[in-house]
Image (spheres, rainbow, N blue to C red):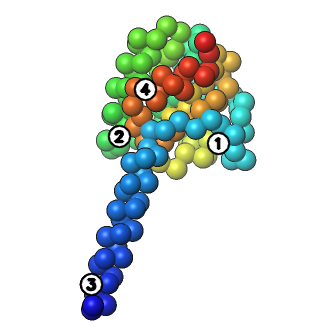
Amino acid sequence: MSPGLIALVVVLVVTTAFGLWRRNTDGRFQSVQSPQQPAGERLSADELGAELGVRATLVQFSSAFCAPCRTARVVLGDVAANTPGVTHVEIAAEDQIELIRRFDVRRTPTLLVLDAAGRVRHRATGAPDRAAVLAALATVAG
């Protein structure tokens, strides 16, 4: 085999593996328990620019040209509209650099699930499906 063909095969294998990994991890909520994001860190209504939900708040960090952000907006908005006590707050990443740094947002959409007290309980990157959002909410408040 020629070196060019070997390089092409390696590139195809690596990009396929990355695509499969990304598809399996996007939109999956993780409990917040890491050195970068300690469990229980809070966001206040003043920081969000909106009132916290009585039960939970879905926070979405978005950017202007982010296609998955539009999908996340629809899913989170629908869940919030149909789940009593849950609100959805979208934050423009470019307008809130301090929060972006504080929560180590590296890509959009980044999603946080806050409990009624504003404590961060779950985090995801990428557009979630409705079932993933509902599962994360189920662990926040009954």
- Give the answer, above or below, for where 35 lies relative to 51: below
Q: Amino acid at mark 2?
A: Pro
- Give the answer, above or below, for where 56 lies relative to 130: above
Q: Residue at x 31, y 90 (%)?
A: 3
Check contact, mark 2 vs mark 3: CB within 8 A: no
Identify the residue under disc 4. Answer: 131
Whole-angstrom CA distance, mark 2 to mark 3, is 34 Å
Of mark 4 and mark 1, the one earlier in the sequence is 1
Q: Using the image, tell me which numbered label, if any, was put on residue 5.
A: 3
Identify the residue under disc 2. Answer: 68
Whole-angstrom CA distance, mark 4 to mark 1, is 28 Å
Q: Amino acid at mark 3?
A: Leu
Whole-angstrom CA distance, mark 3 to mark 4, is 42 Å
Please state which of the two labelled residues, at mark 3 or mark 1, is closer to the viewer: 3
Please identify the residue farthest to the bottom as the structure is shown.
Answer: 2
Give the quarter of the figure containing the C terminus: top right
User: What secondary structure is found at the residue carrying circle 2?
Assistant: helix
Whole-angstrom CA distance, mark 2 to mark 4, is 17 Å
Of mark 1 and mark 2, the one earlier in the sequence is 2
Q: Residue at x 71, y 34 (%)?
A: 39
Q: Using the image, tell me which numbered label, if any, was put on residue 102.
A: 1
User: What secondary structure is found at the residue carrying circle 1?
Assistant: helix
